[in-house]
Amino acid sequence: MGEYLRVFTNRRLWLGFGMLLLLNLFFFWQAQKDGNYGMNLSANFSNSADLSFGINGEIIDRTMDADPARCLRIYRSLLQKYRDTDTLTAQAELKQMTEDLGLLTELYIIVQNKNQYYYADQYEKYRLKYAPYIKKFEQGIWTREDIKSLTVAVDALVSQLSYLNGYEAYLDGIRENKDKLLAFSVFNDADGFSGRNIIRTAGDFEKLAGVQLRLGSDGAVNALLDFPLTDYLLLLTLILVCLSFLEEREKGLWCVVHAAPSGRFGLAAARAGILFWVSAGASVLLYGSDLYVGIAVYGGEIGLDRAAQSVELLGRLPQACTLGGFLVQFFMMRVLSAFVLSLLLWLLLSAVHDVKLTIAVLAFFLGTEYVLYRFLPVQSLFRIFKYFNIFTYIHLSELYTNYLNVDLFGYPAGIRHISQAALLPLGLVCGVWCAVLSCIQKPAGGKSRLVRLAWLWNSVKDRMLRRLGLFGMELYKILFLQRGIVIAAVFVYAVSGLTFTVPAQAVTLPMQLAREYLEQWEGELNGETQAQIAMVQKEIGKAEDALEQAQREYDDGKIDYTQLDACIRENDAAGIKRQALQSVQNRVNELEYLSEERGTALWLLDESVYEGIYGEAAGYLRQRAALVGLLTVSLLLAGCFTYETRSGMNRVARAGLNGRGKWMVTKMSAAVLIAAAVWVLIYGREVYTMMRACRIGSLGAPVQSLKMLSEFPVPCSIGTFLILLYGYRWIMLVCSGFLVLWVSSRMKRMETAYLAGVGMLLPSLLYHYIGIEPFRYLSLSLPVAAMDLLLPGSGSDWRACAAGGLVIAMGIGSLCLIGKEVKFFYLVKNVKQ
């Protein structure tokens, strides 16, 4: 009972699991949002290529800018309507609705372009026939967004119904495929693996013959099975609990525990029980929270009594069961597999005498297993290590979403059945081995080969560390003694997944043509720019005159309709040119006005690249990058002072009169270097993205040539502005690091130091992801991202200066407080003496 109380009253474990649970909930919800809630936003409005854009160049057969949340609401409404309807009937009605949406799309185009020559006749033709619909478009009762959202929702439901109605044909295809393959000589060997596998596959899916699939909300189940982060968080929870079993070794109590013969087995049994209850509780809470959030997002109409194969992700599960039965089985298997994993981890950690080596051994083991699981080819002779792997139990959902038979002595065996059957013997072996090891393993050190090898390595390492100096030892402490290398590795992985430019939206033909004009005419505004615009206007006028001439000749019978149609299409193209040229002319007029006002010649530029990276639309990308950088700096520096405080070395470091300043400078230098490394990795990738997309010559243009920075008060080029921007960001990161150092100097425990360091980012999360406006003024990510303080509508130059000055003041103040504390400690010591 004492061991139960020691583990389950451990505040660090509860705090760590609480943070993991919150992270899981946050990233699970974010994944559904980033995945557009399962909605396919590229659904077509119309099957007619001629209707893909109107005369005004609006592309309306793409819905990349549709609101996924609105589409999901409409989908849920349609699902509620058709849930109890026969699937074939529902599919037929929704396909008819798709055709009706195609007609509405056509009417929308005609109404929007009714003043254009090409659509005038069609408008007159449809005006009476579809008067109610056209009236709603003209009055604004129906909008483009209504059509787009409804189209996406209908497309999602039609796709779901197509799967349900086609599942019987899928099973028939497996049976037919069996007969076709066995007709070939290479497969018809009944004693070979290939022939047996074909027969086994057909036999497994034969059990599903006649299964009745029903419509329901599949989003929650799909999200539960397709979110691997929860698997890793569960593994991390089990590792934390197993590491807590080694505390008696760290505190030198192993000899006392080993000296009690009757207590060894009892302690092992108690720890096995702890691992079981932790596995059960963590699995239910982590995966249960996924399912709960999924139901909240996608709706509660899951339909637990329908067949499991009703969910498309489970279509390859050859097991006849209800969806509710599958979820019960999944959670039971998740608990049992987590328990077996925890026993295996406990065995691995307890087999190593030296506590310091356990992390290295565990990391090597998990890394090797992951490489074999992820990268070993299926055709390899060693493929057995790919499937009989610890990550098979970590990513348990793949056993249910993929059908796979492996060659087991010439016979096909389902990997799911093997994995399930292996749980009991594997658990017994690990449990017995752990108990025996706990009873017979002696705490005497230096006898195992691994420990001797570690001792040899440590002696060599010590000789190398003596040459590092104070600054080198500080970096070594941060990266290795405080396990900062793990944080650095995760940071590099996170940076590789960052994007710095907003996804390309649907571009209309006038917009695309305007960009081409801007690229051709890029440069300082002068008379040549107006001459080029006048030349294109002249071409447009010729096309209009040609159409009028062709219309008169067609009325007189001099030309046929084919020739007239060619002139009409040329005029349509001229209309697109006119719109593109008009947008360019408007921008030229704005730049000329600003040039006269400022007395500086501005440039005509294609601003889309700069808008995509530094504009308002990319704000959430900048904030994400800033949060990743701040989180890394906080975690790496949070234990910088606390580590010495916990070990009692801060008294030694502060005692030397000539060493205190050097000690302070060393930690400041480490903070500056870490901030610089984070800055280079994040914003180096952003600069690389920008340089690949923009024209290098445009960097010499005045920064006021960009619409979003037209009010920037400092006269400089775009290149100079970017240098100032990235320098500002680096200073903000450095000052944030100094603030973390002050927090670290006030903490006595590593756990609270890390918690306080991460807690500094809480206002940023509350503002940017939840939208609580007052926390904007406490958000550290806002000055680090910087651009949001300059863009019109959300900031200005004085706000950027004020925010930057405040962060700099906090950074300098943090250093002053740390220095004062160090000096005060020294004075108190002298007074006592």
Image: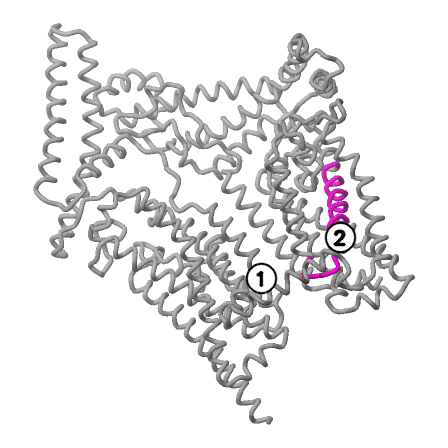
Q: Residue, x 36% and y 58% (percent of image)?
A: 786
State the CA–CA distance, disc 2 to disc 1: 23 Å
Residue 467: % across, % down: 52, 69
Q: Residue, x 71% and y 46% (percent of image)?
A: 284
Q: Left of 687 or right of it: where is 703?
A: left
**Front-most of residues 185 and 598:** 185
Residue 774 in sight from this viewpoint? no
State the residue position of label 2. 346
**Front-most of residues 684 and 557:** 684
Q: Residue, x 79% and y 68% (percent of image)?
A: 253
Q: Left of 699 or right of it: where is 649?
A: right
Amino acid on which disc 1 is placed: Phe
State the residue position of label 1. 480
SS state under label 2: helix
Residue 709: % across, % down: 26, 53
Dot 2, how many residues are within 10 Å of its Cα: few (below 14), some (14-19), or many (20+)? many
Residue 238: % across, % down: 70, 52
Which stretch did the figure color magenta?
Answer: 329-357
Amino acid on which disc 2 is placed: Trp
Residue 281: % across, % down: 73, 50
Q: Which quadrant of the figure has residue 151?
A: top left
Q: Which quadrant of the figure has residue 17?
A: bottom right
Q: Left of 197 or right of it: where is 525?
A: left
Q: Is residue 346 magenta?
A: yes
**Front-most of residues 618 and 811:** 811
Q: Residue, x 26% and y 20% (percent of image)?
A: 119
